[in-house]
Image: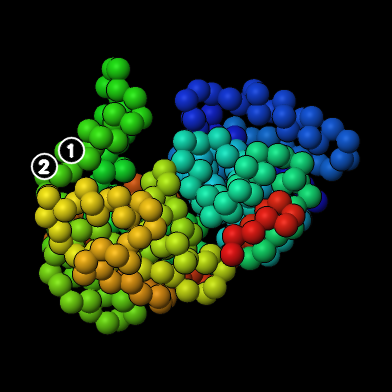
Amino acid sequence: MKHLFLINPYAGKYDRSQEMKEKIRAAMADRGEPWEAAVTEYAGHGVELVRAAAELGEPLRVYACGGDGTLNEAVNGAAGYEHVAVTHYPMGSGNDFLRMFGPDASRFYDLKELLDGPQTPMDLIACGDRLALNVCSIGFDARIGLGVADFKKLPLVNGTMAYQLSAVRTIVQGIHRPYRVEVDGETVPGEEFTLICACNGRYYGGGFNPSPDAMPDDGLLHFVIIPAVSRLTVLALIKKFARGEAGEIPGVILRQGRELKVTCDRMSMINLDGERVDGMELLARLSDKKVNFIYPAGACWR
Protein backbone atom coordinates (compact mmCIF):
# COMPACT_ATOMS: atom_id res chain seq x y z
CA MET A 1 0.00 0.00 0.00
CA LYS A 2 1.36 3.38 -1.03
CA HIS A 3 0.29 6.61 0.67
CA LEU A 4 0.19 9.86 -1.31
CA PHE A 5 -0.25 13.15 0.57
CA LEU A 6 -1.36 16.13 -1.53
CA ILE A 7 -0.43 19.38 0.23
CA ASN A 8 -1.98 22.64 -0.96
CA PRO A 9 0.32 25.48 0.15
CA TYR A 10 -2.46 28.03 -0.46
CA ALA A 11 -5.05 26.42 1.82
CA GLY A 12 -5.86 28.41 4.94
CA LYS A 13 -4.28 31.72 5.89
CA TYR A 14 -0.61 30.83 5.33
CA ASP A 15 1.65 28.17 3.84
CA ARG A 16 1.78 25.17 6.21
CA SER A 17 3.58 22.81 3.82
CA GLN A 18 6.65 22.28 6.00
CA GLU A 19 4.56 21.79 9.13
CA MET A 20 2.44 19.22 7.29
CA LYS A 21 5.48 17.34 6.01
CA GLU A 22 6.76 16.98 9.57
CA LYS A 23 3.39 15.59 10.72
CA ILE A 24 3.38 13.10 7.86
CA ARG A 25 6.95 12.03 8.53
CA ALA A 26 6.13 11.38 12.20
CA ALA A 27 2.92 9.48 11.37
CA MET A 28 4.65 7.24 8.80
CA ALA A 29 7.89 6.68 10.73
CA ASP A 30 7.17 3.17 12.01
CA ARG A 31 4.87 1.87 9.29
CA GLY A 32 7.35 0.50 6.78
CA GLU A 33 5.11 1.50 3.86
CA PRO A 34 6.05 3.69 0.86
CA TRP A 35 4.76 7.24 0.96
CA GLU A 36 5.13 10.54 -0.83
CA ALA A 37 4.28 14.12 0.14
CA ALA A 38 3.64 16.27 -2.92
CA VAL A 39 3.04 20.03 -2.79
CA THR A 40 0.62 21.12 -5.51
CA GLU A 41 1.89 23.96 -7.69
CA TYR A 42 -1.09 25.01 -9.82
CA ALA A 43 -4.79 24.39 -10.35
CA GLY A 44 -5.37 20.82 -11.50
CA HIS A 45 -1.94 19.62 -10.37
CA GLY A 46 -3.51 17.40 -7.71
CA VAL A 47 -5.66 15.65 -10.34
CA GLU A 48 -2.56 14.94 -12.43
CA LEU A 49 -0.55 13.59 -9.48
CA VAL A 50 -3.29 11.27 -8.26
CA ARG A 51 -4.17 9.97 -11.71
CA ALA A 52 -0.52 9.25 -12.53
CA ALA A 53 -0.12 7.30 -9.26
CA ALA A 54 -3.43 5.46 -9.81
CA GLU A 55 -2.41 4.35 -13.29
CA LEU A 56 0.49 2.39 -11.81
CA GLY A 57 -2.13 -0.12 -10.66
CA GLU A 58 -0.91 -0.58 -7.09
CA PRO A 59 -3.10 -0.09 -3.99
CA LEU A 60 -3.06 3.62 -3.18
CA ARG A 61 -4.39 5.87 -0.45
CA VAL A 62 -4.58 9.61 -1.11
CA TYR A 63 -4.78 12.28 1.59
CA ALA A 64 -6.00 15.71 0.47
CA CYS A 65 -4.21 18.10 2.84
CA GLY A 66 -5.98 21.37 2.10
CA GLY A 67 -9.49 22.66 1.66
CA ASP A 68 -12.51 21.44 -0.29
CA GLY A 69 -10.80 22.32 -3.58
CA THR A 70 -7.87 20.02 -2.77
CA LEU A 71 -10.30 17.22 -1.89
CA ASN A 72 -12.08 17.82 -5.20
CA GLU A 73 -8.82 17.44 -7.12
CA ALA A 74 -7.98 14.21 -5.30
CA VAL A 75 -11.46 12.85 -6.07
CA ASN A 76 -11.20 13.77 -9.76
CA GLY A 77 -7.89 11.94 -9.99
CA ALA A 78 -9.05 8.83 -8.12
CA ALA A 79 -12.62 8.39 -9.42
CA GLY A 80 -13.27 5.08 -11.09
CA TYR A 81 -10.13 3.36 -9.75
CA GLU A 82 -11.19 0.58 -7.39
CA HIS A 83 -7.67 0.20 -5.96
CA VAL A 84 -7.52 3.89 -4.92
CA ALA A 85 -9.13 5.57 -1.91
CA VAL A 86 -9.11 9.23 -0.83
CA THR A 87 -9.71 11.19 2.33
CA HIS A 88 -9.41 14.73 3.65
CA TYR A 89 -6.99 16.14 6.17
CA PRO A 90 -8.66 19.55 6.64
CA MET A 91 -6.51 22.65 6.23
CA GLY A 92 -8.92 25.00 4.43
CA SER A 93 -11.37 27.62 5.60
CA GLY A 94 -14.54 25.64 4.88
CA ASN A 95 -13.85 21.89 4.93
CA ASP A 96 -17.55 21.52 4.20
CA PHE A 97 -17.82 17.91 3.07
CA LEU A 98 -16.60 16.68 6.45
CA ARG A 99 -19.31 18.59 8.36
CA MET A 100 -21.80 15.78 7.73
CA PHE A 101 -19.74 13.62 10.11
CA GLY A 102 -20.89 15.84 13.00
CA PRO A 103 -18.77 15.41 16.15
CA ASP A 104 -16.61 12.87 14.32
CA ALA A 105 -15.42 15.52 11.84
CA SER A 106 -12.67 16.57 14.26
CA ARG A 107 -11.18 13.06 14.02
CA PHE A 108 -10.05 13.81 10.46
CA TYR A 109 -7.33 16.00 12.01
CA ASP A 110 -5.67 12.81 13.32
CA LEU A 111 -3.52 11.37 10.53
CA LYS A 112 -3.15 8.02 12.28
CA GLU A 113 -6.92 7.55 12.30
CA LEU A 114 -6.97 8.14 8.57
CA LEU A 115 -4.01 5.88 7.81
CA ASP A 116 -5.84 2.88 9.28
CA GLY A 117 -9.41 3.98 8.61
CA PRO A 118 -11.97 1.91 6.70
CA GLN A 119 -13.22 3.04 3.30
CA THR A 120 -16.57 3.07 1.51
CA PRO A 121 -17.63 3.88 -2.07
CA MET A 122 -19.35 7.25 -2.44
CA ASP A 123 -21.40 8.74 -5.26
CA LEU A 124 -20.19 11.61 -7.42
CA ILE A 125 -21.83 14.41 -9.40
CA ALA A 126 -20.76 14.68 -13.04
CA CYS A 127 -20.73 18.31 -14.22
CA GLY A 128 -19.37 18.58 -17.74
CA ASP A 129 -15.93 17.00 -17.72
CA ARG A 130 -15.54 17.57 -13.97
CA LEU A 131 -16.71 15.61 -10.95
CA ALA A 132 -17.97 16.92 -7.61
CA LEU A 133 -18.19 15.01 -4.36
CA ASN A 134 -20.25 17.54 -2.45
CA VAL A 135 -22.46 20.24 -4.04
CA CYS A 136 -22.97 21.91 -7.42
CA SER A 137 -25.00 25.13 -7.48
CA ILE A 138 -25.94 28.10 -9.58
CA GLY A 139 -27.63 31.40 -8.73
CA PHE A 140 -27.56 33.81 -5.82
CA ASP A 141 -25.42 31.59 -3.57
CA ALA A 142 -22.80 30.86 -6.22
CA ARG A 143 -22.47 34.53 -7.15
CA ILE A 144 -21.91 35.49 -3.51
CA GLY A 145 -19.56 32.65 -2.59
CA LEU A 146 -17.46 32.76 -5.73
CA GLY A 147 -17.41 36.56 -5.68
CA VAL A 148 -15.74 36.69 -2.27
CA ALA A 149 -12.33 36.36 -3.93
CA ASP A 150 -12.80 39.78 -5.57
CA PHE A 151 -12.97 41.46 -2.16
CA LYS A 152 -10.36 39.39 -0.31
CA LYS A 153 -7.73 41.12 -2.41
CA LEU A 154 -8.61 44.51 -0.90
CA PRO A 155 -6.53 45.86 2.00
CA LEU A 156 -8.00 45.52 5.52
CA VAL A 157 -10.80 43.21 4.29
CA ASN A 158 -11.09 39.92 6.21
CA GLY A 159 -13.08 36.83 5.25
CA THR A 160 -16.34 37.87 6.92
CA MET A 161 -16.22 41.36 5.46
CA ALA A 162 -15.44 39.97 2.00
CA TYR A 163 -18.52 37.75 2.19
CA GLN A 164 -20.69 40.67 3.30
CA LEU A 165 -19.42 42.90 0.50
CA SER A 166 -20.02 40.16 -2.06
CA ALA A 167 -23.56 39.67 -0.70
CA VAL A 168 -24.33 43.39 -1.00
CA ARG A 169 -23.04 43.49 -4.56
CA THR A 170 -25.10 40.44 -5.52
CA ILE A 171 -28.28 41.88 -4.01
CA VAL A 172 -27.75 45.14 -5.92
CA GLN A 173 -27.11 43.27 -9.18
CA GLY A 174 -30.28 41.22 -8.77
CA ILE A 175 -31.27 38.28 -6.60
CA HIS A 176 -32.99 36.08 -9.14
CA ARG A 177 -32.27 35.24 -12.76
CA PRO A 178 -34.22 33.66 -15.63
CA TYR A 179 -33.44 29.94 -15.83
CA ARG A 180 -35.03 26.93 -17.47
CA VAL A 181 -34.83 24.10 -14.95
CA GLU A 182 -35.33 20.39 -15.63
CA VAL A 183 -35.12 17.45 -13.20
CA ASP A 184 -34.79 14.02 -14.81
CA GLY A 185 -36.19 15.45 -18.04
CA GLU A 186 -39.22 17.12 -16.44
CA THR A 187 -39.44 20.91 -16.66
CA VAL A 188 -39.85 22.66 -13.31
CA PRO A 189 -42.57 25.36 -13.34
CA GLY A 190 -41.31 28.93 -13.16
CA GLU A 191 -39.31 31.40 -15.19
CA GLU A 192 -37.04 33.03 -12.59
CA PHE A 193 -35.19 31.40 -9.72
CA THR A 194 -33.01 32.55 -6.83
CA LEU A 195 -30.74 29.53 -6.51
CA ILE A 196 -30.54 25.88 -7.51
CA CYS A 197 -28.43 23.17 -5.87
CA ALA A 198 -27.55 19.57 -6.70
CA CYS A 199 -26.44 17.95 -3.44
CA ASN A 200 -24.49 14.77 -2.81
CA GLY A 201 -23.18 16.07 0.52
CA ARG A 202 -25.00 18.29 3.02
CA TYR A 203 -22.93 21.41 3.65
CA TYR A 204 -21.20 24.00 1.50
CA GLY A 205 -20.22 27.67 1.47
CA GLY A 206 -18.69 27.58 4.94
CA GLY A 207 -21.52 25.76 6.72
CA PHE A 208 -24.73 26.34 4.73
CA ASN A 209 -26.93 23.26 4.93
CA PRO A 210 -29.21 23.12 1.86
CA SER A 211 -30.13 19.44 2.11
CA PRO A 212 -29.81 17.90 5.59
CA ASP A 213 -31.11 14.54 4.32
CA ALA A 214 -28.63 14.13 1.46
CA MET A 215 -26.63 10.90 1.57
CA PRO A 216 -23.42 10.59 -0.44
CA ASP A 217 -23.85 6.84 -0.92
CA ASP A 218 -27.57 6.33 -1.66
CA GLY A 219 -27.45 6.47 -5.45
CA LEU A 220 -29.51 9.67 -5.59
CA LEU A 221 -28.87 13.41 -5.79
CA HIS A 222 -30.95 15.86 -3.78
CA PHE A 223 -32.09 18.98 -5.64
CA VAL A 224 -33.03 22.25 -3.93
CA ILE A 225 -34.76 24.77 -6.21
CA ILE A 226 -35.72 28.16 -4.76
CA PRO A 227 -37.99 30.44 -6.84
CA ALA A 228 -37.61 34.19 -7.22
CA VAL A 229 -37.77 36.14 -3.95
CA SER A 230 -37.66 39.86 -3.18
CA ARG A 231 -34.89 41.86 -1.57
CA LEU A 232 -37.09 42.18 1.53
CA THR A 233 -37.30 38.42 2.05
CA VAL A 234 -33.82 37.31 0.94
CA LEU A 235 -32.21 37.69 4.39
CA ALA A 236 -34.84 35.44 6.00
CA LEU A 237 -34.29 32.98 3.17
CA ILE A 238 -30.54 32.89 3.78
CA LYS A 239 -31.06 32.15 7.49
CA LYS A 240 -33.41 29.24 6.80
CA PHE A 241 -31.17 27.92 4.03
CA ALA A 242 -28.12 28.02 6.31
CA ARG A 243 -29.89 26.18 9.14
CA GLY A 244 -31.07 23.26 7.01
CA GLU A 245 -34.63 24.59 6.83
CA ALA A 246 -34.91 25.07 3.07
CA GLY A 247 -38.13 23.06 3.14
CA GLU A 248 -39.78 25.95 5.04
CA ILE A 249 -39.04 28.52 2.31
CA PRO A 250 -42.28 29.43 0.48
CA GLY A 251 -42.44 27.88 -2.99
CA VAL A 252 -39.26 25.81 -2.60
CA ILE A 253 -39.05 22.65 -4.68
CA LEU A 254 -37.23 19.66 -3.16
CA ARG A 255 -36.61 16.66 -5.38
CA GLN A 256 -34.48 13.54 -5.48
CA GLY A 257 -33.22 12.17 -8.77
CA ARG A 258 -30.33 11.55 -11.08
CA GLU A 259 -30.05 14.63 -13.31
CA LEU A 260 -30.51 18.40 -13.08
CA LYS A 261 -30.29 20.70 -16.10
CA VAL A 262 -30.29 24.49 -15.79
CA THR A 263 -30.23 26.62 -18.94
CA CYS A 264 -29.16 30.27 -18.52
CA ASP A 265 -29.70 33.35 -20.67
CA ARG A 266 -26.12 34.54 -20.08
CA MET A 267 -22.71 33.30 -18.94
CA SER A 268 -23.13 32.38 -15.28
CA MET A 269 -20.99 31.37 -12.33
CA ILE A 270 -21.34 27.71 -11.37
CA ASN A 271 -20.10 26.46 -8.01
CA LEU A 272 -18.52 23.01 -8.15
CA ASP A 273 -17.31 21.96 -4.68
CA GLY A 274 -16.32 25.59 -4.06
CA GLU A 275 -14.52 25.94 -7.39
CA ARG A 276 -15.72 28.32 -10.10
CA VAL A 277 -16.84 27.18 -13.54
CA ASP A 278 -18.45 29.61 -16.02
CA GLY A 279 -21.07 28.48 -18.50
CA MET A 280 -24.47 28.96 -20.12
CA GLU A 281 -25.71 25.63 -18.77
CA LEU A 282 -25.37 23.53 -15.66
CA LEU A 283 -25.84 19.80 -16.27
CA ALA A 284 -25.36 17.94 -13.00
CA ARG A 285 -26.02 14.22 -13.06
CA LEU A 286 -25.22 11.19 -10.96
CA SER A 287 -21.90 9.90 -12.28
CA ASP A 288 -21.33 6.31 -13.33
CA LYS A 289 -18.06 6.54 -11.40
CA LYS A 290 -17.64 6.30 -7.64
CA VAL A 291 -14.77 7.11 -5.34
CA ASN A 292 -13.61 5.17 -2.28
CA PHE A 293 -13.60 7.48 0.73
CA ILE A 294 -11.55 6.83 3.90
CA TYR A 295 -12.97 7.79 7.30
CA PRO A 296 -12.03 7.21 10.95
CA ALA A 297 -13.28 3.84 12.24
CA GLY A 298 -16.75 4.19 13.73
CA ALA A 299 -17.36 7.70 12.34
CA CYS A 300 -20.95 8.14 11.23
CA TRP A 301 -22.56 10.31 8.54
CA ARG A 302 -26.01 8.68 8.58
**Is any part of residue 57 visible from this angle?**
no
Please tell me the numbered disc located at residue 190: none
Q: Position of residue 62 (x, y in %)?
A: 66, 48
Which color mode does the image show?
rainbow
Q: Callout 1, which amino acid?
A: Val
- Residue at 22% x, 76% y: name it: 188
Q: Residue at x 23, y 79 (%)?
A: 187
Which residue is at the far top?
155
Find residue 259 and report its horizontal and vertical position in percent.
37, 74
Q: Alpha-carbon neighbours of circle 2 within 10 Å: few (<14), some, or many (≥20)?
A: few
Q: What residue is disc 1 on?
A: 168
The reply to whether residue 21 is in sight is: yes
Identity of the residue furthest to the bottom in this view: 186
Q: Secondary structure at mark 2?
A: helix
> Residue at 27% of width from left, 82% of height from top?
186
For residue 51, side relative to residue 201 (left or right): right
The residue nearer to you, when weighing 172 against 15, is 172
The residue depicted at 19 percent of the width and 51 percent of the height is 234
Image side of residue 115 versus residue 72, left or right? right
Label 1 packing within 10 angstroms: few (<14), some (14-19), many (20+): few
* Quadrant in the rendering for residue 113: top right
Residue 190 is situated, as x and y percent measured from the top left of the image, at: 15, 72
Q: Is residue 48 above or below residue 93?
A: below
Question: What residue is shown with label 2?
Answer: 172
Q: CA distance from mark 1 to mark 2?
A: 6 Å
Q: Do labels 1 and 2 touch, CB within 8 Å? A: yes
- Compared across the picture, whether 174 is left or right of 91 comes to left
Tell which of 270 and 36 is nearer to you: 270
Q: Is residue 206 above or below residue 80?
A: above
Vertical side of 188 occupied by 265: above or below: above
Q: Position of residue 44 (x, y in %)?
A: 48, 44
Q: Amino acid at mark 2?
A: Val
